[in-house]
Amino acid sequence: MSQATLRIQKMSGHAGPVPGEGTQRELQVCKLIDVTTCIGCKACEVACLEWNGLPYRETMFENTYQTMPDTAWNFWNVIKFNEYERPDGSLMWLMRKDQCMHCAEPGCLAACPADAAIVQYANGVVDFQQDHCIGCGYCISGCPFNIPKFNSATKKVFKCTLCSDRISEGLEPACIKACPSGCLHFGTKDDMKELAEKRAGQLRDHFGFANAGVYDPPGVGGTGVIYVLHDATNPEEYGGLPKNPTIPWVVKLWKGPVKWLGNLAIAGGIIAVTLHYLRYGAKTVKEDNRAEGGQP
Amino acid sequence: MSSGRALPLNSAAGASGQRLLRYTLAERVNHWIATLSYIYLLLTGLAFWSPYLFWLVIFSGGGPTARFWHPWVGLLFTASVLYMYALWRGDMLLTPADLVWRRSLLNYIRNEDENLPPVGRFNMGQKQFFWLMLGGGILLALSGFGLWFADALPWSLRYLRYLAIFLHVVFALATIGGFIIHVYMGTAVVRGGFTSIIRGEVSAGWARLHHRLWYDQVTGGSPRKK
Protein backbone atom coordinates (compact mmCIF):
# COMPACT_ATOMS: atom_id res chain seq x y z
CA MET A 1 0.00 0.00 0.00
CA SER A 2 0.98 3.61 -0.23
CA GLN A 3 2.04 3.67 3.39
CA ALA A 4 4.63 1.02 2.62
CA THR A 5 6.59 3.48 0.52
CA LEU A 6 6.76 5.80 3.54
CA ARG A 7 8.41 3.17 5.71
CA ILE A 8 11.56 4.74 7.13
CA GLN A 9 14.73 3.28 5.70
CA LYS A 10 17.43 5.53 7.19
CA MET A 11 17.36 7.96 10.06
CA SER A 12 19.64 10.88 10.94
CA GLY A 13 21.28 11.12 14.38
CA HIS A 14 19.62 7.96 15.59
CA ALA A 15 21.26 5.55 18.01
CA GLY A 16 21.04 1.98 16.78
CA PRO A 17 19.08 0.50 13.90
CA VAL A 18 16.02 2.12 12.38
CA PRO A 19 12.96 0.98 14.37
CA GLY A 20 10.93 -1.51 12.40
CA GLU A 21 13.75 -2.21 9.97
CA GLY A 22 13.52 -5.67 8.50
CA THR A 23 10.14 -6.43 10.03
CA GLN A 24 8.63 -6.66 6.58
CA ARG A 25 10.45 -9.20 4.47
CA GLU A 26 8.36 -8.57 1.41
CA LEU A 27 5.41 -6.57 0.25
CA GLN A 28 3.48 -9.24 -1.64
CA VAL A 29 0.41 -10.39 0.27
CA CYS A 30 -1.42 -13.62 -0.37
CA LYS A 31 -4.58 -15.43 0.60
CA LEU A 32 -4.23 -19.19 0.98
CA ILE A 33 -7.36 -21.31 0.61
CA ASP A 34 -7.00 -24.91 1.72
CA VAL A 35 -10.05 -26.46 0.04
CA THR A 36 -9.40 -29.73 1.86
CA THR A 37 -10.46 -28.19 5.16
CA CYS A 38 -13.29 -25.99 3.90
CA ILE A 39 -16.60 -27.06 5.41
CA GLY A 40 -18.73 -24.87 3.14
CA CYS A 41 -20.21 -22.87 6.01
CA LYS A 42 -20.38 -19.58 4.03
CA ALA A 43 -19.09 -17.50 6.95
CA CYS A 44 -16.66 -15.89 4.50
CA GLU A 45 -19.56 -14.92 2.19
CA VAL A 46 -21.39 -13.23 5.05
CA ALA A 47 -18.25 -11.52 6.37
CA CYS A 48 -17.53 -10.18 2.89
CA LEU A 49 -21.03 -8.73 2.56
CA GLU A 50 -20.87 -7.20 6.03
CA TRP A 51 -17.44 -5.64 5.85
CA ASN A 52 -17.96 -4.24 2.36
CA GLY A 53 -21.48 -3.04 3.20
CA LEU A 54 -22.95 -4.72 0.16
CA PRO A 55 -26.73 -4.63 -0.32
CA TYR A 56 -28.83 -7.71 0.23
CA ARG A 57 -28.98 -10.12 -2.67
CA GLU A 58 -31.39 -13.00 -2.99
CA THR A 59 -29.78 -16.41 -2.88
CA MET A 60 -30.78 -19.39 -4.98
CA PHE A 61 -31.38 -23.01 -4.18
CA GLU A 62 -30.38 -25.37 -6.94
CA ASN A 63 -30.10 -28.60 -4.96
CA THR A 64 -26.50 -27.91 -4.06
CA TYR A 65 -24.63 -26.30 -1.21
CA GLN A 66 -23.98 -23.25 -3.37
CA THR A 67 -25.47 -19.85 -2.53
CA MET A 68 -25.74 -18.74 -6.17
CA PRO A 69 -24.24 -19.83 -9.49
CA ASP A 70 -21.52 -17.17 -9.65
CA THR A 71 -20.17 -14.11 -7.96
CA ALA A 72 -22.14 -10.92 -8.60
CA TRP A 73 -21.45 -7.21 -8.52
CA ASN A 74 -22.67 -7.14 -4.93
CA PHE A 75 -21.54 -10.67 -3.98
CA TRP A 76 -17.78 -10.94 -4.42
CA ASN A 77 -17.16 -14.27 -2.82
CA VAL A 78 -19.06 -17.52 -3.37
CA ILE A 79 -18.31 -21.08 -2.31
CA LYS A 80 -18.46 -23.26 -5.42
CA PHE A 81 -19.80 -26.72 -4.71
CA ASN A 82 -19.31 -29.87 -6.74
CA GLU A 83 -20.27 -33.44 -5.94
CA TYR A 84 -17.36 -35.27 -7.48
CA GLU A 85 -17.28 -38.98 -8.16
CA ARG A 86 -13.84 -40.45 -7.76
CA PRO A 87 -12.60 -43.22 -10.09
CA ASP A 88 -13.29 -45.79 -7.36
CA GLY A 89 -16.95 -44.73 -7.25
CA SER A 90 -16.79 -42.90 -3.93
CA LEU A 91 -18.08 -39.36 -3.63
CA MET A 92 -16.32 -36.17 -2.62
CA TRP A 93 -17.93 -32.84 -1.85
CA LEU A 94 -15.59 -30.26 -3.27
CA MET A 95 -15.96 -26.75 -1.83
CA ARG A 96 -13.94 -23.93 -3.29
CA LYS A 97 -14.10 -20.31 -2.26
CA ASP A 98 -14.31 -18.40 -5.55
CA GLN A 99 -13.31 -14.75 -5.73
CA CYS A 100 -10.84 -12.47 -7.49
CA MET A 101 -7.47 -14.22 -7.79
CA HIS A 102 -5.44 -10.97 -7.78
CA CYS A 103 -3.23 -12.09 -10.66
CA ALA A 104 0.32 -10.82 -10.92
CA GLU A 105 -0.44 -10.19 -14.61
CA PRO A 106 -4.11 -9.18 -14.50
CA GLY A 107 -6.10 -9.62 -17.71
CA CYS A 108 -8.69 -7.11 -16.51
CA LEU A 109 -6.02 -4.44 -16.15
CA ALA A 110 -4.54 -5.25 -19.56
CA ALA A 111 -7.94 -4.91 -21.24
CA CYS A 112 -9.10 -1.75 -19.42
CA PRO A 113 -9.02 1.46 -21.52
CA ALA A 114 -9.80 3.94 -18.72
CA ASP A 115 -6.97 5.79 -17.00
CA ALA A 116 -6.36 4.28 -13.53
CA ALA A 117 -9.72 2.48 -13.35
CA ILE A 118 -7.84 -0.71 -12.39
CA VAL A 119 -4.68 -0.54 -10.31
CA GLN A 120 -2.31 -3.09 -8.87
CA TYR A 121 -0.78 -2.10 -5.57
CA ALA A 122 2.81 -2.93 -4.71
CA ASN A 123 1.44 -5.62 -2.40
CA GLY A 124 -0.11 -7.39 -5.39
CA VAL A 125 -3.75 -6.49 -4.74
CA VAL A 126 -5.66 -5.70 -7.95
CA ASP A 127 -8.26 -3.05 -7.16
CA PHE A 128 -11.03 -1.44 -9.22
CA GLN A 129 -11.36 2.33 -8.85
CA GLN A 130 -15.02 2.83 -9.68
CA ASP A 131 -14.67 6.61 -9.89
CA HIS A 132 -12.41 6.14 -12.94
CA CYS A 133 -14.39 3.24 -14.43
CA ILE A 134 -16.23 4.10 -17.67
CA GLY A 135 -18.33 0.93 -17.63
CA CYS A 136 -17.11 -0.54 -20.92
CA GLY A 137 -16.87 -4.09 -19.59
CA TYR A 138 -13.57 -4.90 -21.29
CA CYS A 139 -12.27 -6.22 -17.94
CA ILE A 140 -15.00 -8.87 -18.09
CA SER A 141 -13.44 -10.15 -21.31
CA GLY A 142 -9.90 -9.79 -20.01
CA CYS A 143 -10.45 -11.94 -16.90
CA PRO A 144 -9.77 -15.68 -17.26
CA PHE A 145 -11.65 -16.40 -13.99
CA ASN A 146 -15.07 -14.79 -14.72
CA ILE A 147 -14.75 -12.37 -11.81
CA PRO A 148 -15.55 -8.73 -12.72
CA LYS A 149 -19.31 -8.16 -12.57
CA PHE A 150 -21.22 -5.25 -14.08
CA ASN A 151 -23.81 -3.22 -12.23
CA SER A 152 -26.18 -2.06 -14.94
CA ALA A 153 -27.67 0.64 -12.72
CA THR A 154 -24.41 2.43 -11.92
CA LYS A 155 -22.59 1.18 -15.04
CA LYS A 156 -19.55 0.26 -12.96
CA VAL A 157 -17.76 -3.03 -12.49
CA PHE A 158 -17.12 -4.57 -9.08
CA LYS A 159 -15.17 -7.44 -7.56
CA CYS A 160 -13.26 -8.54 -4.46
CA THR A 161 -10.78 -5.92 -3.24
CA LEU A 162 -8.89 -8.40 -1.04
CA CYS A 163 -10.14 -5.96 1.63
CA SER A 164 -7.45 -3.50 0.57
CA ASP A 165 -8.95 -1.07 3.10
CA ARG A 166 -8.34 -3.60 5.91
CA ILE A 167 -4.92 -4.85 4.90
CA SER A 168 -3.62 -1.31 4.49
CA GLU A 169 -4.28 -0.99 8.22
CA GLY A 170 -2.56 -4.27 9.01
CA LEU A 171 -5.75 -6.31 9.33
CA GLU A 172 -6.50 -9.56 7.55
CA PRO A 173 -9.31 -9.65 4.95
CA ALA A 174 -12.82 -10.09 6.37
CA CYS A 175 -13.25 -13.59 4.91
CA ILE A 176 -10.04 -14.78 6.60
CA LYS A 177 -11.16 -13.35 9.94
CA ALA A 178 -14.52 -15.12 9.74
CA CYS A 179 -13.30 -18.59 8.71
CA PRO A 180 -14.04 -21.05 11.55
CA SER A 181 -12.26 -24.09 10.14
CA GLY A 182 -8.90 -22.46 9.56
CA CYS A 183 -8.91 -23.26 5.87
CA LEU A 184 -8.21 -19.59 5.06
CA HIS A 185 -4.83 -18.06 5.75
CA PHE A 186 -3.38 -14.66 5.01
CA GLY A 187 0.22 -13.47 4.94
CA THR A 188 3.10 -12.80 2.62
CA LYS A 189 3.21 -14.65 -0.67
CA ASP A 190 6.39 -16.50 0.35
CA ASP A 191 4.92 -17.63 3.66
CA MET A 192 1.63 -18.74 2.14
CA LYS A 193 3.44 -20.60 -0.63
CA GLU A 194 5.53 -22.44 1.94
CA LEU A 195 2.53 -23.25 4.11
CA ALA A 196 0.59 -24.47 1.07
CA GLU A 197 3.39 -26.72 -0.10
CA LYS A 198 3.71 -28.15 3.40
CA ARG A 199 0.00 -28.90 3.51
CA ALA A 200 0.04 -30.42 0.01
CA GLY A 201 2.94 -32.66 1.07
CA GLN A 202 0.97 -33.73 4.12
CA LEU A 203 -2.00 -34.63 1.92
CA ARG A 204 0.21 -36.62 -0.41
CA ASP A 205 2.17 -38.40 2.31
CA HIS A 206 -0.45 -39.03 4.99
CA PHE A 207 -3.92 -38.75 3.42
CA GLY A 208 -3.52 -40.68 0.19
CA PHE A 209 -4.09 -37.77 -2.15
CA ALA A 210 -1.26 -38.56 -4.53
CA ASN A 211 -2.03 -35.61 -6.77
CA ALA A 212 -2.44 -33.04 -4.01
CA GLY A 213 -0.78 -29.76 -4.89
CA VAL A 214 -0.81 -25.97 -4.88
CA TYR A 215 -2.70 -23.90 -7.44
CA ASP A 216 -0.68 -20.78 -8.25
CA PRO A 217 -1.12 -20.61 -12.04
CA PRO A 218 2.00 -19.38 -13.88
CA GLY A 219 -0.04 -18.39 -16.96
CA VAL A 220 -1.08 -15.19 -15.19
CA GLY A 221 2.26 -14.74 -13.43
CA GLY A 222 1.02 -16.41 -10.24
CA THR A 223 -1.88 -15.18 -8.15
CA GLY A 224 -2.44 -13.36 -4.89
CA VAL A 225 -4.92 -16.09 -3.95
CA ILE A 226 -3.59 -19.64 -3.97
CA TYR A 227 -5.33 -22.96 -3.35
CA VAL A 228 -4.36 -26.29 -1.88
CA LEU A 229 -6.25 -28.91 -3.91
CA HIS A 230 -6.65 -32.65 -3.24
CA ASP A 231 -6.07 -33.12 -6.95
CA ALA A 232 -4.10 -30.30 -8.50
CA THR A 233 -4.12 -32.07 -11.88
CA ASN A 234 -7.88 -31.61 -12.10
CA PRO A 235 -8.72 -28.06 -10.97
CA GLU A 236 -11.79 -27.86 -13.26
CA GLU A 237 -13.68 -30.16 -10.89
CA TYR A 238 -13.49 -27.44 -8.24
CA GLY A 239 -16.32 -25.37 -9.70
CA GLY A 240 -14.56 -24.68 -12.98
CA LEU A 241 -11.15 -23.49 -11.79
CA PRO A 242 -9.27 -23.16 -15.11
CA LYS A 243 -6.38 -25.55 -15.56
CA ASN A 244 -4.00 -23.12 -17.22
CA PRO A 245 -5.52 -19.63 -17.07
CA THR A 246 -3.95 -16.97 -19.26
CA ILE A 247 -4.99 -13.56 -20.51
CA PRO A 248 -7.31 -14.37 -23.46
CA TRP A 249 -5.52 -14.46 -26.83
CA VAL A 250 -7.76 -11.74 -28.17
CA VAL A 251 -6.68 -9.29 -25.47
CA LYS A 252 -2.99 -10.06 -26.06
CA LEU A 253 -3.42 -9.67 -29.82
CA TRP A 254 -5.51 -6.51 -29.55
CA LYS A 255 -3.27 -4.77 -27.00
CA GLY A 256 -0.11 -6.04 -28.73
CA PRO A 257 0.53 -6.48 -32.46
CA VAL A 258 -2.89 -5.26 -33.64
CA LYS A 259 -2.44 -2.01 -31.75
CA TRP A 260 0.96 -1.36 -33.27
CA LEU A 261 -0.09 -2.34 -36.79
CA GLY A 262 -3.21 -0.19 -36.44
CA ASN A 263 -1.28 2.82 -35.19
CA LEU A 264 1.24 2.43 -38.02
CA ALA A 265 -1.57 2.14 -40.57
CA ILE A 266 -3.37 5.26 -39.29
CA ALA A 267 -0.18 7.33 -39.11
CA GLY A 268 0.98 5.90 -42.45
CA GLY A 269 -2.33 6.81 -44.09
CA ILE A 270 -2.17 10.40 -42.89
CA ILE A 271 1.47 10.75 -43.99
CA ALA A 272 0.69 9.13 -47.36
CA VAL A 273 -2.17 11.49 -48.24
CA THR A 274 -0.08 14.49 -47.12
CA LEU A 275 2.80 13.40 -49.35
CA HIS A 276 0.37 12.80 -52.21
CA TYR A 277 -0.93 16.32 -51.91
CA LEU A 278 2.57 17.80 -51.82
CA ARG A 279 3.55 15.84 -54.92
CA TYR A 280 0.38 15.87 -57.04
CA GLY A 281 -1.99 18.41 -55.52
CA ALA A 282 -5.59 18.86 -56.61
CA LYS A 283 -7.28 17.73 -59.79
CA THR A 284 -8.10 20.70 -61.99
CA VAL A 285 -11.33 21.13 -63.94
CA LYS A 286 -11.30 23.26 -67.11
CA GLU A 287 -14.66 24.98 -67.51
CA ASP A 288 -13.93 26.63 -70.89
CA ASN A 289 -15.02 23.82 -73.21
CA ARG A 290 -18.57 24.81 -73.97
CA ALA A 291 -19.27 22.48 -76.83
CA GLU A 292 -20.89 19.22 -75.89
CA GLY A 293 -18.45 16.40 -76.10
CA GLY A 294 -15.46 18.72 -75.94
CA GLN A 295 -12.39 17.41 -74.24
CA PRO A 296 -12.50 18.24 -70.57
CA MET B 1 -30.75 3.80 -61.24
CA SER B 2 -28.80 7.06 -61.47
CA SER B 3 -30.61 9.91 -59.89
CA GLY B 4 -29.82 13.52 -60.59
CA ARG B 5 -30.85 15.73 -63.44
CA ALA B 6 -29.50 18.70 -65.34
CA LEU B 7 -30.47 21.97 -63.76
CA PRO B 8 -30.21 25.20 -65.74
CA LEU B 9 -29.09 27.03 -62.64
CA ASN B 10 -26.72 29.84 -62.05
CA SER B 11 -27.11 31.39 -65.47
CA ALA B 12 -25.16 34.43 -64.32
CA ALA B 13 -22.02 32.35 -64.66
CA GLY B 14 -22.56 32.22 -68.38
CA ALA B 15 -23.14 29.40 -70.79
CA SER B 16 -20.43 27.28 -69.23
CA GLY B 17 -21.96 27.79 -65.79
CA GLN B 18 -24.47 24.99 -66.16
CA ARG B 19 -24.96 23.29 -62.79
CA LEU B 20 -25.94 19.68 -62.43
CA LEU B 21 -27.72 18.19 -59.43
CA ARG B 22 -25.42 15.48 -58.20
CA TYR B 23 -26.86 14.69 -54.77
CA THR B 24 -30.46 15.09 -53.69
CA LEU B 25 -31.28 16.70 -50.37
CA ALA B 26 -32.03 13.29 -48.84
CA GLU B 27 -28.67 11.98 -50.01
CA ARG B 28 -26.88 14.99 -48.60
CA VAL B 29 -28.65 14.92 -45.25
CA ASN B 30 -28.00 11.21 -44.91
CA HIS B 31 -24.36 11.64 -45.86
CA TRP B 32 -23.90 14.24 -43.10
CA ILE B 33 -25.67 12.11 -40.52
CA ALA B 34 -23.20 9.36 -41.41
CA THR B 35 -20.28 11.84 -41.37
CA LEU B 36 -21.03 13.42 -38.01
CA SER B 37 -21.89 10.14 -36.32
CA TYR B 38 -18.74 8.55 -37.76
CA ILE B 39 -16.56 11.39 -36.46
CA TYR B 40 -18.11 10.99 -33.01
CA LEU B 41 -17.51 7.23 -33.15
CA LEU B 42 -13.96 7.80 -34.38
CA LEU B 43 -13.04 10.22 -31.58
CA THR B 44 -14.62 8.18 -28.79
CA GLY B 45 -13.41 4.90 -30.33
CA LEU B 46 -9.84 6.17 -30.55
CA ALA B 47 -10.12 7.24 -26.90
CA PHE B 48 -10.98 3.65 -25.96
CA TRP B 49 -8.30 2.35 -28.36
CA SER B 50 -5.20 3.89 -26.81
CA PRO B 51 -4.34 5.37 -23.41
CA TYR B 52 -2.45 8.09 -25.28
CA LEU B 53 -5.72 9.15 -26.91
CA PHE B 54 -7.97 8.71 -23.85
CA TRP B 55 -7.98 12.51 -23.47
CA LEU B 56 -10.26 12.60 -26.54
CA VAL B 57 -13.17 11.77 -24.23
CA ILE B 58 -13.15 15.43 -23.14
CA PHE B 59 -14.97 16.18 -26.42
CA SER B 60 -17.82 13.92 -25.44
CA GLY B 61 -18.29 14.66 -21.79
CA GLY B 62 -15.81 12.25 -20.22
CA GLY B 63 -15.27 8.50 -20.26
CA PRO B 64 -18.58 7.19 -18.88
CA THR B 65 -20.59 9.56 -21.11
CA ALA B 66 -18.56 8.59 -24.17
CA ARG B 67 -19.10 4.93 -23.35
CA PHE B 68 -22.82 5.50 -22.90
CA TRP B 69 -23.37 7.29 -26.22
CA HIS B 70 -20.88 5.43 -28.44
CA PRO B 71 -23.19 2.43 -29.08
CA TRP B 72 -26.27 4.60 -29.66
CA VAL B 73 -24.44 6.83 -32.11
CA GLY B 74 -23.13 3.63 -33.67
CA LEU B 75 -26.71 2.52 -34.31
CA LEU B 76 -27.39 5.88 -35.96
CA PHE B 77 -24.32 5.46 -38.16
CA THR B 78 -25.31 1.94 -39.19
CA ALA B 79 -28.86 3.07 -39.92
CA SER B 80 -27.54 5.85 -42.14
CA VAL B 81 -25.22 3.54 -44.12
CA LEU B 82 -28.15 1.15 -44.59
CA TYR B 83 -30.25 4.04 -45.94
CA MET B 84 -27.29 4.97 -48.12
CA TYR B 85 -27.41 1.44 -49.48
CA ALA B 86 -31.10 1.90 -50.31
CA LEU B 87 -30.29 5.18 -52.08
CA TRP B 88 -27.16 4.21 -53.96
CA ARG B 89 -27.01 0.46 -54.37
CA GLY B 90 -27.70 0.62 -58.12
CA ASP B 91 -24.99 3.19 -58.72
CA MET B 92 -22.52 1.38 -56.52
CA LEU B 93 -22.44 -2.02 -58.25
CA LEU B 94 -19.00 -2.75 -59.63
CA THR B 95 -19.17 -2.97 -63.43
CA PRO B 96 -16.73 -4.38 -66.03
CA ALA B 97 -15.92 -0.75 -66.88
CA ASP B 98 -14.62 -0.33 -63.31
CA LEU B 99 -12.16 -3.14 -63.86
CA VAL B 100 -10.91 -1.34 -66.97
CA TRP B 101 -10.67 1.89 -64.97
CA ARG B 102 -8.69 0.12 -62.28
CA ARG B 103 -5.89 -0.56 -64.78
CA SER B 104 -5.43 3.19 -65.01
CA LEU B 105 -5.42 3.70 -61.25
CA LEU B 106 -1.88 5.07 -61.34
CA ASN B 107 -3.05 7.72 -63.80
CA TYR B 108 -5.80 8.63 -61.37
CA ILE B 109 -3.36 8.87 -58.48
CA ARG B 110 -1.02 11.07 -60.57
CA ASN B 111 -3.93 13.34 -61.54
CA GLU B 112 -3.54 12.38 -65.21
CA ASP B 113 -7.31 12.26 -65.57
CA GLU B 114 -7.29 12.73 -69.33
CA ASN B 115 -5.86 9.20 -69.60
CA LEU B 116 -8.73 7.61 -67.68
CA PRO B 117 -11.63 5.76 -69.23
CA PRO B 118 -14.97 7.49 -68.55
CA VAL B 119 -16.91 6.41 -65.46
CA GLY B 120 -20.51 6.66 -64.33
CA ARG B 121 -21.94 8.36 -61.26
CA PHE B 122 -19.26 6.89 -59.00
CA ASN B 123 -15.77 5.66 -59.76
CA MET B 124 -14.35 2.40 -58.53
CA GLY B 125 -12.67 3.96 -55.49
CA GLN B 126 -15.93 5.54 -54.34
CA LYS B 127 -17.72 2.25 -54.84
CA GLN B 128 -15.14 0.33 -52.85
CA PHE B 129 -15.34 2.91 -50.07
CA PHE B 130 -19.13 2.60 -50.07
CA TRP B 131 -19.02 -1.19 -49.72
CA LEU B 132 -16.32 -0.94 -47.06
CA MET B 133 -18.45 1.42 -44.97
CA LEU B 134 -21.61 -0.63 -45.53
CA GLY B 135 -19.95 -3.91 -44.59
CA GLY B 136 -17.97 -2.21 -41.83
CA GLY B 137 -21.08 -0.50 -40.48
CA ILE B 138 -22.99 -3.77 -40.30
CA LEU B 139 -20.13 -5.79 -38.79
CA LEU B 140 -19.23 -3.04 -36.32
CA ALA B 141 -22.84 -2.94 -35.18
CA LEU B 142 -23.08 -6.73 -34.83
CA SER B 143 -19.79 -7.01 -32.97
CA GLY B 144 -20.65 -3.86 -31.07
CA PHE B 145 -23.60 -5.60 -29.45
CA GLY B 146 -21.13 -8.09 -27.97
CA LEU B 147 -19.21 -5.20 -26.41
CA TRP B 148 -22.27 -3.19 -25.44
CA PHE B 149 -23.78 -6.02 -23.43
CA ALA B 150 -20.56 -7.74 -22.38
CA ASP B 151 -22.16 -9.01 -19.17
CA ALA B 152 -25.18 -10.47 -20.94
CA LEU B 153 -23.27 -13.30 -22.57
CA PRO B 154 -22.80 -16.30 -20.30
CA TRP B 155 -19.32 -17.47 -19.42
CA SER B 156 -19.68 -20.48 -21.71
CA LEU B 157 -20.12 -18.12 -24.70
CA ARG B 158 -17.15 -15.93 -23.84
CA TYR B 159 -15.47 -16.80 -27.15
CA LEU B 160 -18.21 -14.83 -28.91
CA ARG B 161 -17.16 -11.82 -26.84
CA TYR B 162 -13.53 -12.35 -27.80
CA LEU B 163 -14.52 -12.60 -31.46
CA ALA B 164 -16.64 -9.45 -31.11
CA ILE B 165 -13.68 -7.47 -29.73
CA PHE B 166 -11.44 -8.68 -32.55
CA LEU B 167 -13.95 -7.90 -35.31
CA HIS B 168 -14.74 -4.50 -33.83
CA VAL B 169 -11.07 -3.52 -33.74
CA VAL B 170 -10.25 -4.85 -37.22
CA PHE B 171 -13.26 -3.27 -38.94
CA ALA B 172 -12.82 -0.01 -37.07
CA LEU B 173 -9.25 0.18 -38.41
CA ALA B 174 -10.40 -0.73 -41.93
CA THR B 175 -13.03 2.02 -41.94
CA ILE B 176 -10.51 4.52 -40.54
CA GLY B 177 -8.24 3.78 -43.50
CA GLY B 178 -11.12 4.34 -45.91
CA PHE B 179 -12.22 7.45 -44.04
CA ILE B 180 -8.77 9.09 -44.28
CA ILE B 181 -8.66 8.55 -48.05
CA HIS B 182 -12.30 9.59 -48.53
CA VAL B 183 -11.94 12.87 -46.61
CA TYR B 184 -8.67 13.65 -48.37
CA MET B 185 -10.04 12.93 -51.85
CA GLY B 186 -13.32 14.68 -51.23
CA THR B 187 -11.83 17.89 -49.88
CA ALA B 188 -8.25 18.36 -51.07
CA VAL B 189 -7.94 16.49 -54.35
CA VAL B 190 -11.30 16.47 -56.11
CA ARG B 191 -12.14 20.16 -55.74
CA GLY B 192 -15.85 20.66 -55.99
CA GLY B 193 -16.58 17.34 -54.37
CA PHE B 194 -16.98 18.84 -50.92
CA THR B 195 -19.36 21.56 -52.08
CA SER B 196 -21.31 18.99 -54.09
CA ILE B 197 -22.14 17.00 -50.96
CA ILE B 198 -23.16 20.23 -49.19
CA ARG B 199 -25.20 22.05 -51.86
CA GLY B 200 -25.73 19.09 -54.16
CA GLU B 201 -24.50 20.72 -57.37
CA VAL B 202 -21.48 20.33 -59.58
CA SER B 203 -20.38 22.24 -62.66
CA ALA B 204 -20.72 20.70 -66.08
CA GLY B 205 -16.97 20.69 -66.50
CA TRP B 206 -16.56 18.88 -63.19
CA ALA B 207 -19.06 16.25 -64.22
CA ARG B 208 -17.43 15.81 -67.63
CA LEU B 209 -13.97 15.38 -66.12
CA HIS B 210 -14.78 13.09 -63.24
CA HIS B 211 -17.94 11.22 -64.22
CA ARG B 212 -18.26 11.41 -67.97
CA LEU B 213 -20.83 8.61 -68.38
CA TRP B 214 -23.00 10.11 -65.67
CA TYR B 215 -22.69 13.55 -67.31
CA ASP B 216 -23.83 12.11 -70.62
CA GLN B 217 -26.71 10.38 -68.93
CA VAL B 218 -28.08 13.36 -66.99
CA THR B 219 -27.58 15.87 -69.79
CA GLY B 220 -29.01 13.52 -72.40
CA GLY B 221 -25.81 13.81 -74.38
CA SER B 222 -24.79 10.94 -76.60
CA PRO B 223 -23.28 8.34 -74.30
CA ARG B 224 -19.89 7.29 -75.50
CA LYS B 225 -19.64 3.60 -76.11
CA LYS B 226 -16.86 2.03 -74.15
Image (cartoon, grey):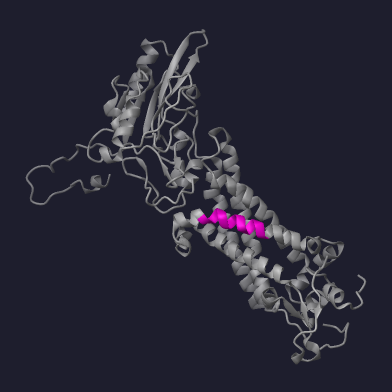
Picture layout, residue B95 above or below residue A72: below
Dividing the image into 4 quarters, which one contains the N terminus of chain A? top left
Q: Position of residue A93 (x, y in %)?
A: 44, 15
Question: Is residue B76 located in the magenta-colored stretch of the structure?
Answer: yes
- Above or below residue A216? Residue B59 is below
Horizontal side of B8 relative to A73 (left or right) equals right
Q: Is residue B182 left or right of residue A39?
A: right
The C terminus of chain A sits in image quarter: bottom right
- Percent x, y of residue B147: 55, 47
Q: Nearer the viewer, residue B57 or A213?
A: B57
Magenta stretch, main secondary structure, is helix
Horizontal placement of A248 versus B90: left or right? Answer: left
Residue, x 70% and y 68% (percent of image)? B26
Above/below status of A124 relative to B103: above
Q: Is residue A176 visible?
A: yes
Residues drawn in magenta: B69-80
Q: Is residue A191 visible?
A: no
Magenta span has A71?
A: no
| Residue B44 image point, x, y percent | 52, 59
